[in-house]
Image (tube, rainbow, N blue to C red):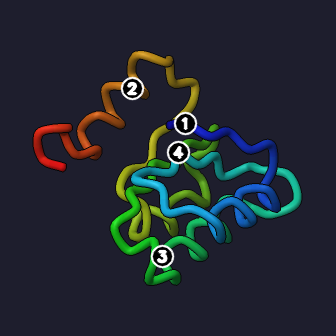
Amino acid sequence: TTEIVQDGQDAIARLSAIVPDMVILDLNLPHVHGSEILRTVRGDERLAETRVIVTTTHWQGAEEVEQEADLVILKPVGYEQLRDLASRFLPRESET
């Protein structure tokens, strides 16, 4: 299942209700910056196994999130590239 949210406030609300396998997170979100959402994920025991891929248009400032994210990539990133990157971090069906 894939869920898409429009801003940082929606992301935090959804993360309080679900435990996703993965979060693909843009740093530049309205209302709540992506780095704050990353801190929320990493600070929540329920989300300890959640993988986080961060996307950004500017590397400047992304260095600080590198230590918390599983992967930081520069945009633009195409659908197939993102799918391939995400598949590296998700468990295979035979492993679940």
Q: CA distance from mark 1 to mark 4?
A: 10 Å
Mark sitting earlier along the chain (3/4): 4
Residue 42's disc is: 3
| Residue that badge 1 annotates | 2
The residue at 50%/18% (across/down) is 78
Q: Residues within 10 Å of mark 4 (few under 14, many from 20)?
A: some
| Residue that badge 2 annotates | 83
Residue 59 to residue 94: above or below: below
Kind of residue at disc 3: Arg
Kind of residue at disc 1: Thr
Mark sitting earlier along the chain (1/4): 1
Q: Secondary structure at mark 3?
A: helix
Mark sitting earlier along the chain (3/2): 3
Q: Can you tell which quarter of the image residue 17 is in?
A: bottom right
Q: Can you tell which quarter of the image residue 82 is in?
A: top left
Mark sitting earlier along the chain (2/4): 4
**Residue 56 place in picture, x, y as percent:** 60, 43
- Point out the frontmost of discs 1 and 3: 1
- Point out the frontmost of discs 1 and 2: 1
| Residue that badge 4 annotates | 24
The residue at 40%/53% (across/down) is 21
